[in-house]
Amino acid sequence: MQHFLEFKDFTQAQYQYLFKRTAILKSRFKNYVRHMPLQDRTLVMIFEKASTRTRLSFEAGMHQLGGAAIYLNTRDTQLGRGEPVEDAAQVISRMCDLVMIRTFDQEIIQRFAAHSRVPVINGLTNEYHPCQILADLFTFIEHRGSIEGKTVAWIGDSNNVCNTWLQAAEILNFQVHVSTPPGYEVEPERAGLHSTGHFTEFQDPMMAVAGVDLVTTDVWTSMGFEAENEVRRKAFEHWCVDTDMLAAAKPGALFMHCLPAHRGEEVAAEVIDGPQSVVWDEAENRLHAQKALMEFLLRGELLDDQ
Ligand code: CP
Ligand code: NVA
């Protein structure tokens, strides 16, 4: 049994399978071909933070694969009243086949997984967002081919999404240029990195984007850090991906954002709504990539005609 708690839980070969499989499942979906390998299987989704895309893509995805999805949130479960996560894991995992959790500390999902009888998927923690980068990489491959040897610029907060890009770079062998305001730099240990060989930090965001293949960013204040909002707004004001910044990247470089976005803060409207932005494909691909992920965790690698 395998869990998907952080990006480095899977090997390069497993990602190559998942990207290939995602393309197949996407094509079946677009052509209205029924594909229901997970009939009678149940996914439980536990949310301790808000979500639009993650909930929708997992719930719709499980339904399309023939299974059922159940939504639980902290407010109206016993988790919100202090039931130990270990006990919840024992009980929940006896009643379903797969669990997805969006929570705060990575440690919570690790404790849940350690007591779960079924695979657990990280739907975002303070440290990581592996499902997002699975979809982002698939989106890059769809538009530009293999990411191996390419360079990605991460502009803004070294948050859960950034950490996951950095893990992905080690596994899939590409480079990440990171530019954060002082005091918000990458913490390699928190990011779960083996080395610093796949990323370079830049004080000046214009230097970080020079000649890169993909520019990406995320909100200045992630969920759970709202108390820092005002301080961060000031600290990050020069870390807005605008048209000048995108123009410094390679001609035709892509722009991605995991969404939700704040136009005028981390990204200019002209960039996110402009011709180099692939954010809507990126959001849609959450559905296809996570269908491949759920199928893989419950059925293993399947052949092209299965
Ligand atoms: N990108 C992402 O995970 O979006 P949600 O917070 O809407 O799930
Ligand atoms: N970094 C953001 C991502 C939201 C999908 C957050 O954690 O709030």
Image (cartoon, rainbow, N blue to C red):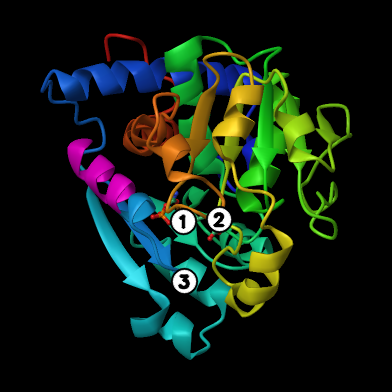
Q: Local crowd at mark 2 within 10 Å, few (<14), some, or many (≥20)?
A: many
Q: In this rendering, is residue 245 above or below 117?
A: above
At a point 71% along the width and 12% down the height, the residue shown is: 149
**Residue in the picture at 50% in, 54% down:** 264
Q: Which mark is residue 38?
A: none
Inspect the image, locate mark 2, and give the three-letter code of the amino acid beneath it: Val
Residue that carries the numbered disc 1 in the rendered image: 262
* Dot 1: element: loop
Image: magenta residue range:
56-66
**Which quarter of the rendered picture does the N terminus lie within?**
top right
Q: CA distance from mark 2 to mark 1?
A: 7 Å
| Marks 1, 3: nearer the viewer | 1
Indicate whether residue 199 is drawn in magenta: no
Q: Residue furthest bottom?
A: 81
Residue 200 as seen in the image, left or right of residue 255: right
Tell me, yes or no, whether the two marked residues, 2 and 1, touch with CB atoms within 8 Å: yes
Q: Nearer the viewer, mark 2 or mark 3?
A: 2
| Residue marked by disc 3 | 48
State the mark number for residue 219.
Answer: 2
Q: Position of residue 207 (x, y in %)?
A: 79, 31
Disc 2 beta carbon < 8 A from ligand 2?
yes
Which residue is at a point 27% across and 61% down the rendered structure image? 70
Type of the residue with mark 3: Glu
